[in-house]
Amino acid sequence: MRRIGKKLLATGIVAASFLATSSVAKAEDVTGGGASFPYTFLVSAIAEFNKTTGHNLTYTSTGSGTGKRNFKAGTFKFAGTDSAVTGSDIPTFGWTYVPYLAGATAIAYRLDEIKGATLSLSKDTLNGIFAGLITNWNDPNIAADMKISPAFANQKKKSDLKGASTLWENVGNKQARVTVTLLPATVKSSKGKTIEVIDTKTKKVVRNARIDSKGQYGLTFSTDVKNEYQVKVAGKEVAKYKVANVTFPDKPIVVVYRQDPSGTTNNFCLFMRSAVNPSWVQNDNFGSCVPGGISSFGSRFQGQQTSTNLSNYIADTNGTIGYTEVSYVTDATRAAKGIRAANIRNAAGAYVAPTSFNYNSFLSKATIDSLGLATFNYNQTSNKTAYPIGPVTYGLGQTASDAKNKVVSEFFQWVLTTYAPANAEALGYTPLLGSFQQSGVTLAKKVGAS
């Protein structure tokens, strides 16, 4: 196994496009599907790939479990999964994994009574909630986590700039970091303009950044609990934070989980088993991951198919909590309804947000085997910026030499070397760089090569 290493933390854009040097002899229709975790990214990437090459790739968000089964059956020419292919899902033909993208899994919630404050949750509290032991929002364990640091709350429900969103985290004594994420179109329209954090009491800019080609910007600054902090992008207000008086309601907690076989579930359960409570079980089915199962929890636990449906259910239902890819939470429509992402206490004791920087920090200590599968290190006791929940997502491709497989190979190589480094952060994901990217490219080249 190889350590992914610090190169993964590098930023930048690959200047030369892989597609610029490729030629298309004949346009191909190529059908794929599977993991819903990367769907937001793939919609954008596939549209650009098809536009540039003339091919017609399609991808259906079905969940990792269905993706693996349909890939084996030949229904999908290529597939996506956030978990390993095992047992009866292993194809009889030649195939390979292609790691091509990563991203943080947010602990998403909607709780209107806390007035836009960001939840801080320790691992013990997470275990209590998702194992059905903590059943009410006014539980003292939740309140105790929130007292660790000031509860800065975003008072603005809807950003004035389309495609701009923020995440807040307290990073030290009287310090905070706001991470601003800009969708690709917003990056393009705002390039050269400024992101500002303004202390509204003093009317001073306490931190700023110039927008270049990146999709995510972290701004760290000193705070005063008596003051309010306005976040502007290109002169438009996207968020306004001040300390809220948080009182948790006497309200049942409704846990929302993936009902379909899911790689997102697999990775969430892996985190729970490896970093929280060894009684958890790692697999694609949430109901059999939870110690003792969920059959006795009744309506307090609600299952939903796909990340989209799970995220919509949370956004539409006050008092809910679940797990989903962070881009589903920062989506403007859902965010306006009140969905938020919690800050999670990591092994170093810091409460961190599910940003690309923080998840990249966590991934930097992972290892990768010859198949391309990642093994995570959850015991990073000195890494205060590591956000510890999320997957690496994989493509599944056939190695047989035919025209459609060669298009799949071309697509994944282009994603790894060009599209993801330039656009993943803006879309709420984490690009694979360094040795992990190199491994992905090597494996992508095996698709359609034999």
Image: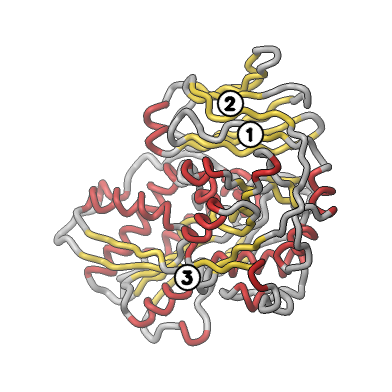
Q: Label 3, label 2: how many angstroms apart (C-alpha)?
A: 37 Å
Name the amino acid, label 3: Ser
Name the amino acid, label 1: Asn
Above/below status of 196 relative to 387: above
| Extreme residue toward the left, this view | 26
Residue at the spot 40% in from the left edge and 64% down from the top edge? 61
Q: Label 1, label 3: how many angstroms apart (C-alpha)?
A: 34 Å
Residue that badge 3 annotates? 64
Q: Is residue 435 left or right of residue 20?
A: right
Residue at the spot 37% in from the left edge and 71% down from the top edge? 397
Above/below status of 252 relative to 171: below
Q: Quadrant of the N terminus?
A: bottom right
Asked whether 440 or 322 is in front, the reply is 322
Q: Is residue 147 left or right of residue 129?
A: right
Q: Residues within 10 Å of mark 1 (few under 14, many from 20)?
A: many
Residue at the spot 74% in from the left edge and 31% down from the top edge? 243
Q: Of discs 1 and 3, which sits in the foreground?
A: 1
Circle 1: element type = strand
Q: Earlier in the sequence, mark 3 or mark 2?
A: 3
Residue that badge 1 annotates? 154
* Residue 231 marker: 2
Q: Of discs 3 and 2, which sits in the foreground?
A: 2
Q: Earlier in the sequence, mark 1 or mark 2?
A: 1
Q: Is residue 281 visible?
A: yes
Name the amino acid, label 2: Val
Q: Position of residue 175 (x, y in %)?
A: 75, 30
Residue at the spot 48% in from the left edge and 62% down from the top edge? 99
